[in-house]
Amino acid sequence: MSESAEKYGNGAEKRPLTAVEWLEDVYNKQGRILPQQFEQAKVMHKEEIMDAVDSWVVNGNIKGEQYYNETFGKP
């Protein structure tokens, strides 16, 4: 997950914000979203997808970045 993703949750249940949660947090704090913040959310979303797919990989048949690029194209 991107370094800009803040920790979220209560007590021991700390986890990174999803891209959508991070963008919502930015909007709630600033009342607007700048283009570079929207781009950061897209990068975070790509990382989330790649991390998820990497965790599904069996015998290294597919990697998260390959899956993302084949499914969504390069950002």
Image (tube, grey):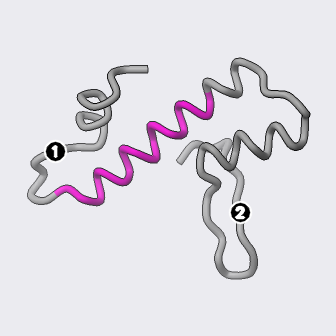
Question: What's the amino acid at mark 1?
Answer: Ile
Furthest residue in direction bottom, as rendered: 12
Mark 2, other Cα within 10 Å: few <14 / some 14–19 / many ≥20: some
Q: How far apart are marks 2 and 1 (CA)?
A: 30 Å
Mark 1 nearby-residue class (10 Å; few <14, some 14–19, many ≥20): few
Residue occupying image coordinates x 36% and y 54%: 52
Q: Quadrant for the C terminus, please.
A: top left
Q: Does the magenta stretch include residue 22?
A: no
Mark 2 = which residue? 8
Q: Which x, y percent locates residue 6?
A: 71, 52
Q: How far across and down, in percent of the image, does residue 1 sit?
A: 53, 48
Tell me the magenta residue range.
40-57
Labelled pair 2, 1 in contact (Cβ < 8 Å): no
Considering every residue shown, the one lying at the far right of the view is: 30
Q: Could you tell me which residue is drawn at 36 percent across and 44 percent down?
A: 50
Residue 28 image position (x, y, % from top left): 87, 43
What amino acid is found at the position of numbered circle 2 in the picture?
Answer: Tyr
Q: Name the N-terminal-most of marks 2 and 1.
A: 2
Instruction: Write down the quadrant of residue 41 in the picture.
Output: top right
Residue situated in front as seen by the camera: 5 or 26: 26
Q: Which residue is drawn at 29% across and 59% down?
A: 55
Q: Which picture quadrant has residue 39? A: top right
Q: Say which mark, if any, is on residue 62.
A: 1
Main SS category, magenta section: helix
Q: Which residue is found at the position 13% from the left and 59% from the top? A: 58
Where does the image place residue 12, in percent across and percent down from the top left?
A: 67, 81
So how many labels did they put on this image? 2
Question: From the viewer's perspective, is 34 left or right of 73?
Answer: right
In depth, the one of 56 and 59 nearer the eye is: 56
Q: In which quarter of the image is residue 27?
A: top right
What element does badge 1 sit on? Answer: loop
Q: Is 49 colored magenta in this rendering? A: yes
